[in-house]
Every structure is written in structure tokens, then in C-alpha cells.
Image (cartoon, rainbow, N blue to C red):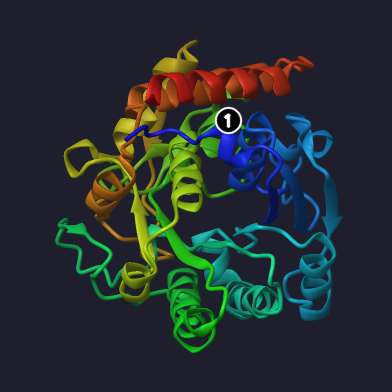
Amino acid sequence: MRPVPDPGWWRGRKVLVTGHTGFVGGWLCAWLSRLEARVAGFALEPPTTPSFFASAGVAAQLAKDERGDVNDAGRVRAAVQAFAPQVLFHLAAQPIVRDGYRDPVGTFATNVMGTVHVLEACRAAPSLERIVVYTTDKVYRNDQSGRAFSEDDRLGGNEPYSASKSAAEWAVGAYWESYFRRAAKRPMVATVRAGNIVGGGDWARDRLLPDAIRAFAAGAPLVVRSPASTRPWQHVLDAVRGTLLLAERGAAADEAAERLGWNFGPEPGDVHPVSAVADLASRAWGGGARWRHEADASIPESRALVLSSARALDALGWRCAWDLDRAIAESVAWYRAALAGGPGLASLTARQVDAHAAEAA
């Protein structure tokens, strides 16, 4: 089973991506462009300045680039109806854990009702063959044991961000059982629970690698809150590749009826603590880059999070192609090019997509 997307399946296929101006959505659009899909995007303005979307020239790779808010049900419905996609990837979200503490109402509104608005629009779109909704690896009720969570484990977040994403999972399940499963032309419906994603072009605050790049570029040490906490780190291209494979190959309807969720993350033995990422980023940056520990108990954080991606391996032939060392090295190379002000970030992005695909194959 070839663990990379098939260009023949994607060429000319109409794909709508919500949240395409974000970090993961932008990389997804960049790979879809390499596959010659016809891509439309629906999202707010890029959430950061700079942004991957602007730096990598994603807009130029799209058939349609529309600004809109998933909290506006009418705009969402109109966007889906106008483009009539065959595949829809829903990534628009409030994606930051600490922002969920700062703005729980906005987080629940976007992550839950925004998803419901997208599902409602999909319900009225007979063109759709595949619907893939991004949630998070943090949807699981984390008992802090360090065991690897599988798709059958109990959902339920302990804070606004993870709770809102768990609720989005339940909304997808309810729409599947109530509407999509019963449709005459039944689309594939799935959710993606990806592990912690790193890669060039993520400039969000309160994320480890962007914080590291900002600190190193300023000649300051990276401040690390919880160096011993473990996370399932992976490069954005591994997560995007799994997402594309899932949509391309679909899931048998009977199986999808029981298990909508799909984990994408490194094998449990390749899960590393925050300190390891900080060490690798410091070495990749060079020039005496360093980090220091500064505890911050103002917002509680999970000590351990591990995923089992056995289902993705068995059904899709997917596993992470780049280990943590490679993932950080490729990410830092992208950031260095961006900070140098070079105009070639679209080409660098394309080269990284192509290299990853070749190595994964």
C-alpha cells in the first residue's frame, strides 16, 4: 500500500478548505496544489503577521480565496453551494489552548458551532464525496498515565479548547448518524486527531517552536514552562499526508459508522518531552541558542500525551516519515529562509513537500 497521495486521484478534483489561511490549512493547500487539485479556501484573514499563507504565496495556488467566518452560517452555506466541492476539509478553528482559557465563549462558538455550520452546509451539498473535520489529539479524557490513546478511548477535554474539540467530535458523530449515514449518496465522514504539529510558517503565540524562533532571532533564550511534559510531535507534512490519504481512500461506510476518528502521530516509542524539542531547535538554530526553564502554573497543562496510530498504519499504510530530529531541522530551515527575507518561500515549501513525499514513498 503506497503511503503517499495519488496525483491521478486528486488532479482536477474540487476541494474546499476552511481555515486555509492558517498554518496547517496553508500547508494542506500547498500539497493539494502540487497534486493539481482545484482548491477553494474559506477563512478569516491570516491569524498572524507574518503568516505561512502570505509568505508561501498560497493565494496564488487557489482557484478561489474567500474571506469569511464559520460563525456566519449563511456565508458558509453560500461558499459550499457556490463552489460545489467533491472534498471538504474543515480546519477553521480557534487552535490555541491558552487562548481557550482567555476566551472560552469565542472558543466554543468557533470550534463547536462553526463546525455545526459547516456540517449543515455539507448536508445540502450533493456534490460532496468526502468530509474531513480536524479536531485535535487533546480530545481524549487524559488520565495522565502516559498510555497511548486509541480512537476508541473516551473523549472529553478538561479545559475550554479540548472540551470544545471533543464537542465538535460529538457533533460530527451526530450528523453522521442522523443525516449522512442515511443519505442516498452517502459521503465518507471522518475526523482527524493529529498530534502536536511543527513546521515552518507557524507564527502562533504560546506554541513551542514559534516561541523558540522568535527568542533565538532576538538573541534571547527560549522560556520553557514544562520541559518534562511529553507530546506526540510530528512535522506538518506527516499530518497533511495522513489527511490526504484518508480523504483519497475513504473508509468503508460500515466501519466509518462505528469509528469516525483517526489518530495521526508518531509511534509511542518516538514521543519526546518538551526539553528534547527545545534542545533540537537550539542546535538547529546554532549561534549559542539556548533555553531555560521558567515554571508557569497559571494555566494547568497535561504532563503526558501519547497517541496510537495503529489504525492509520493498518488501513492507510501511514506512519510518520520524518523523525523529530528531521522535523525540527526542516522547520528551522524554513524559518531561517523566512527571516532572511528571501522571495523563494513558495519554492522552498514545494521542495519540502516533494522531498517528504519521495521519502514517505
Question: Where does the image place residue 196, in percent across and percent down from the top left?
Answer: 41, 47
Residue at the spot 55% in from the left edge and 25% down from the top edge:
353
Name which quarter of the figure residue 126 lies in. bottom right
Residue at the spot 79% in from the left edge and 17% down from the top edge:
343
Front position in the image: 12 or 296: 12
Residue 111 shows in this picture: yes
- Work out which quarter of the rendered image holds the C terminus and state it: top left
Q: Residue furthest top?
A: 287
Residue at the spot 71% in from the left edge and 79% down from the top edge:
124
Type of amino acid at the residue the image marks with label 1: Gly
The answer to whether 125 appears left or right of 233 in the picture is right
Residue at the spot 63% in from the left edge and 47% down from the top edge:
25
Front position in the image: 309 or 34: 34
SS for dot 1: loop
Can you identify the residue that label 1 sits on?
200
* Number of marks present in the image shown: 1
Question: Where does the image place residue 253, in percent across and percent down from the top left?
Answer: 39, 69
Residue 290 shows in this picture: no
Front position in the image: 234 or 263: 263
The answer to whether 94 appears left or right of 265 in the picture is right
Question: Where does the image place residue 69, in percent across and percent down from the top left?
Answer: 78, 68
Residue 143, relative to residue 356: is it above or below? below
